[in-house]
Amino acid sequence: MRSGIAAVVDRLGAGLRRYGHDVDVVTSADVGRRHLGEWRLTGLVRHWPALRRRLPDYDVVHLHGPAPTFSDAFLALWRTVPAQQRPGLVYTHHSDIALDRLMPLCDAYNRMHRRLSRAASHVVVSTESYRTIAGGRQAHGVEVIPFAGDGGAAVAERRPGRMVVVFLGQLRPYKGADVLVRAAAQLPDLVVHIAGGGHQEARLRTLAAGLGADNVRFHGVVSDAERTALLGAADVIALPSRTRAEAFGLVLLEGMRAGAVPVASDLPGVRDVAGATGLLVQPGSVRSLVQALCHLRDDPADRRRRSLASVATAAEYTWDTTVRAYHRVLSDAALAGRLRSAPSWHVDGALALMREAALAERASLLLLDRKRERLRVVSVSGRPLPEGAHHAGADLDSFAGRALLAGEPYVVSTETEVLGRRYQPDAHAGLCVPFELRGEMQGVVSFTRHRALDFLPQEVSWMQRRVGHVAERVLETAQDAARVEDPGEAIA
């Protein structure tokens, strides 16, 4: 059973490719690794020269961690690359390293890794709890992008009878499956399913047998169909993790989507996912877990209420939202990297990158001349407009002009009303973002989307910040920026 980080990388890669990105994945398996119990050592340092030569081929690098001797080594070696030769770097902090009986060493490692992560231009975490943990005093600069659970089972009607508890995950000490086995031994009227593989499996089976926990059923590594069946039958999805090595719990969302109530350890990140609709227990405490399970067993009405709330909460976490948010962050890092490496970069290249960042098929940069009489088309990026079609930035009275007058972004969609009538653009959605330049010159960057994607509020605010910055940097070095490249597109 693969780890949560691997699942996230897989889903993000697939989603970004759908948006037109070229994505290459390099893992510890590519550079070699060795397992020493809970320790996993990689050969990244040995492979760094080859990776270093590939960096110029990329606009942005997305690093996931912490992964001892991989993410930390990469961050340390990254600093040896001249700033002008680095692409953008985004670092996603998944969790802290936390191993029983080695916590002082782990705490020192986590502090060191946080310092190294400052080499990234953007740091991302999955929950508000981890914003402060990962960012420290710079927590305000850390972005929160939650993950999402896979589709899994549809919501199922729970059958009367013995309450069913399901654990899905790697059988490693920090996951706390042994805590669940000990709790199950005290609650013989429950049915407990444990699915997953790992070096702790044999020890857990021995523990269950020694405690006489006949109600615990081990499934080993399961197929997708078996996983879906288990989630569909679950009244409770359990995640009794012992340490901060558990920082989100994708499996909680999968269970919640199927109607299972989450019972999870009160840990940073995990509590953000499960706390609103489930029950939180003290990490490593058998007694606390028994009490939570007893409550749900003895109060079916509350269990039903929490089940419905869990379904609604899980529906708010979607991979599409996650991928779009990462697309925005990665595009921002790529833009910053390009401007750093080529400060005199031409306006057309900047506009093309902004168009890609906006997931738009077409973008235009327009300037209002000093007499404030004509809106001049400086550059156009993307597909040409069909004959007779409207463009969000090509109608001065309705769209670009409104954005300039209001001094704030103007969003156009199939729901937009113009002069009392609903506008029916050729495209699905448009966005006009005004900006100010020194010398009282004004401009608008407009984007057009043909795909069925509305502009989300967070996308609009991000484009507002980025458009002004990029436009000023590019226009400062483009001597002919104010020239009308296509007089036919000038708008009176």
Image (cartoon, grey):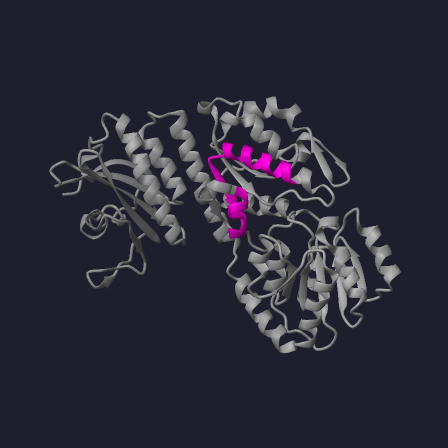
Q: Quadrant of residue 274?
A: bottom right
Q: Which residues are magenta?
A: 107-134
Q: Position of residue 428 (x, y in %)?
A: 35, 54
Across and down, in percent, residue 218 comes to 80, 59
> Does residue 383 appear in this view?
no
Name the residue nearer the viewer: 444 or 312: 312
Q: Main secondary structure of the magenta part?
A: helix
Query: Closer to the camera, 236 or 148?
Result: 236
- In percent of width and height, residue 23 lies at 53, 37
- Left/right of residue 409 with respect to residue 299 in the rendered view: left
Left or right: 439 as drawn, with respect to 329: left
Count of numbered circles on the image: 0
Residue 124 on the magenta span: yes
Q: Residue at x 62, y 78 (%)?
A: 301
On screen, 90 above or below 8?
A: above
Q: Confirm whether the magenta stretch covers residue 43.
A: no
Which image quadrant is residue 491 in? top left
- Residue 368 is left or right of residue 340, and the answer is left
The residue lying at 59 percent from left, 70 percent from top is 306
| Residue 285 visible (yes or no) | yes
Quarter of the image with the C terminus is top left
User: Viewer-proximal residue, 175 or 165?
Assistant: 175
Residue 432: give x, y in percent of width and height: 28, 47
Give the residue at the far front of this rendering. Answer: 104
